Image (cartoon, rainbow, N blue to C red):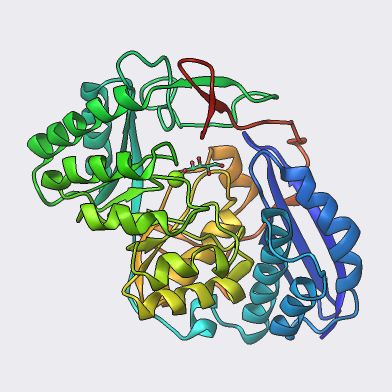
């Protein structure tokens, strides 16, 4: 089998999504997600100029060699743009090989380690009461795990809180970055009250998660971890920016609240120290941004040695293609923890027909050969690209802070 075509499809059914489609001389094609939120066209240019032409004529079953060709061969290693481009190629090749073998992707990876994949949904509210209503709505829908993000008294808007109750949270909400204001002290004073209320109302069984979105310093994160210990969170996510991996050792010494990190990582080198020092509990890499299945399974294998489980990033800014591939990976990977799930818009679901299904707080990837996600190109063409940027964050005195 030979690759005869590789094309990039950009569509915006509510938000920008980038798909790489690789076609072979045997009529089998595969697709991969290449979406990098707020930087979509950078990956499109990388793929169109440097990757697609070099794929033509290659054997799609040489997945490992093609991975090494674009990683080692580029000389310029790592980085979100490069690794998203490689991730899309890799996902599409695994899709092709699944279709060629007539097997769902999880079987190619090594078969089922579990019957279904537990996911967590997102509950958001402007105040604690609003959050509790949203958690209740998720529990009614069958979710066993819910991430809870709440407005902070005295701060106009914050990460993770939808504009209106029940609406989907969409951070990339303006053409150029909008500006938010942040106060660490107001946040730290409020959050423990939120989780106390969640436990009082929903009891002990519900898995409860929270995303700090990189906004604290290590000692502040240690305080938060300690103060929410009585509410036994499933995890506290991205409590500090993780460029400084050794900072987590200190947080770890102060709290038993489980820690999750990794949605902005793009290689095993970004998390090696965190994993080897046993400073985290969940690794949140994504198949798109961390070089595809071929690379993320190396991360998962390293993590397994240190009791670290997977908890993959699954926001709406990754397309259903990434979600489908991730669900196959989750079905196979021995050290699975949980999978994030943010429902895509109806338009997005229609552009990307898929075999995966939600039932009772869990997903199954389906039995369709490959990753089970397709693209309706005619429908995709109805939604042209629109520039959209993530916000920035400033402290109350104007200092630019982590968003
Ligand atoms: C988030 C994301 O899902 C999460 O945990 O942190 O919503 C993140 O803000 C976006 O993916 C950024 O593109
Ligand atoms: Mg996050």
- Examine the image and state in which quarter residue 38 appears: top right
Q: Nearer the viewer, residue 15 or 302?
A: 302
Asked if residue 132 lies left or right of residue 246, the reply is: left
Q: Position of residue 63 (x, y in %)?
A: 70, 81
Q: Nearer the viewer, residue 216 or 323?
A: 216
Asked if residue 172 lies left or right of residue 92, the reply is: left
Which quadrant of the picture is home to ligand 2?
top left
Q: Position of residue 269 (x, y in %)?
A: 56, 68
In the displayed structure, 371 sits above or below 162; it is below
Q: Nearer the viewer, residue 18 or 174?
A: 174
Q: Nearer the viewer, residue 342 or 230?
A: 230
Q: In what quadrant of the picture does the N terminus appear?
A: bottom right
In the displayed structure, 133 sits above or below 216; it is above
Asked if residue 378 shows in the view, the reply is no
The residue shown at (33%, 13%) is: 154
In the displayed structure, 156 sits above or below 58; it is above
- Examine the image and state in which quarter residue 56 appears: bottom right
The residue shown at (42%, 14%) is: 156
Asked if residue 277 lies left or right of residue 141, the reply is: right
Asked if residue 343 shows in the view, the reply is yes
Q: Position of residue 298 (x, y in %)?
A: 53, 77
The residue shown at (88%, 62%) is: 50
Total numbered badges shown on the rendered structure: 0
- Examine the image and state in which quarter residue 157 appears: top left
In the displayed structure, 188 sits above or below 307; it is above
Q: Position of residue 26 (x, y in %)?
A: 82, 81
The residue shown at (42%, 33%) is: 160
């Amino acid at each position: 089998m030979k690759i005869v075509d590789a094309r990039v499809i950009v569509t915006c059914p509510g938000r920008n999504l980038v798909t790489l489609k690789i076609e072979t001389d045997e009529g089998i094609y595969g697709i991969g997600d290449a979406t990098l939120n707020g930087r979509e066209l950078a990956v499109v240019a990388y793929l169109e100029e440097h990757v697609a032409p070099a794929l033509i004529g290659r054997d799609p079953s040489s997945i490992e060699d093609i991975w090494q060709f674009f990683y080692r061969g580029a000389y310029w290693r790592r980085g979100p743009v490069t690794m998203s481009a490689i991730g899309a190629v890799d996902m599409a090749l695994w899709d092709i090989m699944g279709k060629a073998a007539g097997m769902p992707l999880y079987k190619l990876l090594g078969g089922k380690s579990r019957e279904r994949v537990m996911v967590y949904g997102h509950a958001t509210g402007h105040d604690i009461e609003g959050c509790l209503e949203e958690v209740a709505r998720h529990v009614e829908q069958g979710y066993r795990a819910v991430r809870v993000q709440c407005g902070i008294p005295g701060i106009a808007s914050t990460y993770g809180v939808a504009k209106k109750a029940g609406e989907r949270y969409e951070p990339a909400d303006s053409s150029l970055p909008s500006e938010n204001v942040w106060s660490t002290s107001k946040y730290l004073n409020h959050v423990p009250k939120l989780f106390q209320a969640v436990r009082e109302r929903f009891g002990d069984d519900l898995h409860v998660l929270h995303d700090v979105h990189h906004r604290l310093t290590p000692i502040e994160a240690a305080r938060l971890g300690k103060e929410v210990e009585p509410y036994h969170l499933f995890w506290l996510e991205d409590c500090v920016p993780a460029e400084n991996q050794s900072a987590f050792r200190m947080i770890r010494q102060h709290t038993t609240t489980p820690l999750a990190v990794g949605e902005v990582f793009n290689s095993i080198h970004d998390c090696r120290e965190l994993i080897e020092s046993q400073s985290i509990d969940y690794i949140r890499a994504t198949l798109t941004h961390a070089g595809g299945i071929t690379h993320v399974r190396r991360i998962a294998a390293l993590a397994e040695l240190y009791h670290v489980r997977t908890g993959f990033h699954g926001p709406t800014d990754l397309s259903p293609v990434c979600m489908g591939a991730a669900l196959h990976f989750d079905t196979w990977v021995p050290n699975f923890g949980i999978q994030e799930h943010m429902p895509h818009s109806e338009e997005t679901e229609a552009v990307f027909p898929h075999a995966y299904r939600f039932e009772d707080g869990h997903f199954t990837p389906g039995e369709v050969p490959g990753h089970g996600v397709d693209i309706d190109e005619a429908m995709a063409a109805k939604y042209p690209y629109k520039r959209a940027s993530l916000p920035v964050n400033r402290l109350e005195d104007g200092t630019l802070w982590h968003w």
